[in-house]
């Protein structure tokens, strides 16, 4: 069952505002801020989680887990614990949450003070301990399959995750200044700077090396 049959929750699916999907389940936010989920029972919110899903404003999903942000800045997670479906270990840190982002198996939350809290599979960036001291005044996060990249208030970038798949930006760190926007493929990141230049890093097979088109990119 991957969510193709919503008969069990049909009567609850009224005044739906948004729908989100993992690989095997759906979750819908209703107008009153409650959430209805259906699909594979492993990834559907049980009654204990459901009781916490009130005043939900946004849901972030990855392959097998959901993380909901409430109006008072809390996070409620459910699904496969190995994918971040259990945020118990960082529950006390998840306060005043402003944004949530996800890799394939982990989540990252930006708090109101600009710090970041991560949880989920460490191999998919669920552990940011190695860069935690740098994750201050975070404005935006870009996430893809393996890694996260954060733009700070000073427009520099901090990355973490699998170094083979763009989790290590050290080789281009000096170029990552005045960054305005980040985009990602499955295995690389691209940054646009205020000067209109493009900086890439990560696996060359996923676009991590733009040397062959750098002249064209300089005309952006």
Image (cartoon, grey):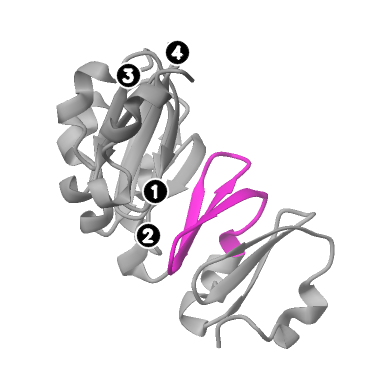
- Give the label, 2 or 1, closer to the camera: 1
Q: Position of residue 132 (x, y in %)?
A: 22, 32
Is 87 colored magenta in this rendering?
A: no
Distance CA(mark 3)–CA(mark 2): 24 Å
Residue at image mark 3: 156
- Give the label, 4 or 2, closer to the camera: 4
Q: Where is residue 1 in the image (x, y as percent from the top left)?
A: 55, 88
- Give the label, 4 or 3, closer to the camera: 4
Q: In this view, does 75 lie to the left or right of 187?
A: right
State the residue at coordinates (46%, 80%): 42
State the residue at coordinates (73%, 80%): 9
Q: In this view, does 203 lie above or below 16?
A: above
Is 59 colored magenta in this rendering?
A: yes
Q: Which mark is residue 194?
A: 4
Residue at image mark 1: 185
- Tell me which numbered mark, 4 or 3, is placed earlier along the sequence: 3
């Amino acid at each position: 069952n991957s969510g193709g049959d919503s008969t069990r929750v049909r009567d609850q699916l009224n005044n739906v505002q948004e729908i989100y999907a993992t690989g095997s389940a759906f979750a819908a936010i209703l107008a009153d801020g409650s959430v209805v989920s259906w699909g594979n029972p492993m990834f559907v919110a049980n009654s204990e989680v459901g009781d916490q899903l009130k005043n939900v404003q946004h849901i972030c999903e990855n392959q097998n887990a959901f993380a909901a942000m409430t109006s008072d800045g809390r996070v409620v997670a459910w699904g496969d614990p190995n994918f971040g479906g259990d945020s118990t270990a960082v529950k006390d840190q998840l306060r005043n949450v402003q944004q949530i982002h996800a890799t394939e198996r982990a989540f990252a939350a930006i708090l109101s003070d600009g710090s970041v809290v991560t949880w989920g599979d460490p191999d998919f960036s669920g552990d940011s301990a190695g860069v935690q001291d740098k994750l201050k005044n975070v404005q935006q996060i870009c996430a893809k399959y393996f890694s996260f990249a954060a733009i700070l208030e000073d427009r520099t970038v901090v990355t973490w995750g699998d170094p083979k798949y763009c989790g290590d930006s050290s080789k281009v760190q000096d170029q990552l200044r005045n960054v305005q926007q980040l985009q990602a493929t499955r295995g690389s990141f691209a940054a646009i700077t205020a000067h209109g230049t493009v900086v890439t890093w990560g696996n060359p097979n996923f676009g991590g090396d733009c040397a062959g088109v750098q002249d064209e990119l300089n005309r952006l």
